[in-house]
């Protein structure tokens, strides 16, 4: 079953954002290069994307699915618009899409 599992936040200062969330909520982050960090709780995690070339304009809710290609086909069939084709990242693959109301989201499939 598909479920929300991630919220990616575009940030200008990854270090400052990590410090804020650590201080305010006790979150611990793992760095993935100099411009990305993520909590790794195994529940709903937060990613901090500091790469201006890769970040979205707004928060990016991410839905975990079991079959990424099948999900992409269903999104298209339901009237969604693919905004970024399937790509890999550490831990899996995902694509971005706009729903019929114009919200940008992502669907991801974890590596086996």
Image (cartoon, grey):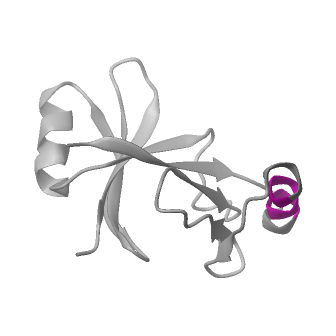
Residue 38 location (% of width, % of height): 61, 65
Rendering quarter of residue 79: top left
Check the image and report above or below for 77 versus 84: above
Q: Is residue 21 magenta?
A: yes
Check the image and report above or below for 40 versus 21.
Answer: below
Q: Name the side, left or right, on which 65 lies relative to 74.
A: right
Q: Specify the quadrant that holds the N terminus.
A: top left
Q: Nearer the viewer, residue 32 or 29?
A: 29
Quadrant in which the C terminus is drawn: bottom left
Q: Residue furthest top?
A: 101
Query: On the rendered structure, is 19 left or right of 64?
Result: right
* Number of marks in the rendered image: 0
Q: Does residue 19 belong to the magenta stretch?
A: yes
User: Magenta region's main secondary structure?
Assistant: helix
Q: Residue at x 33, y 59 (%)?
A: 94
Residue at (66% x, 69% y) in the render: 37
- x and y, in percent, of residue 83 in the image: 37, 44
**Viewer can see residue 84:** no
Q: Please name the residue shown 15% across and 56% down the image.
A: 67
The residue range painted magenta reads 16-22
| Occupied quadrant, residue 55 | bottom right
In this picture, is 77 found above or below 44? above
Can residue 77 be seen from the camera position used here? yes
């Amino acid at each position: 079953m598909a479920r929300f599992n991630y919220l990616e936040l575009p940030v200008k200062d990854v270090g400052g954002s990590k410090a804020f969330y650590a201080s305010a909520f006790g979150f611990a982050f793992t760095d993935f290069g100099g411009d990305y960090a993520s909590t790794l709780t195994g529940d709903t995690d937060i990613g901090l994307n500091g790469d201006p070339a890769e970040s979205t304009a707004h928060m990016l809710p991410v839905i975990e699915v079991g079959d990424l290609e099948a999900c992409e086909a269903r999104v298209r069939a339901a009237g969604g618009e693919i905004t970024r084709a399937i790509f890999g990242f550490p831990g899996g693959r995902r694509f971005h899409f706009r729903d019929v109301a114009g919200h940008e989201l992502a669907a991801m499939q974890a590596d086996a």
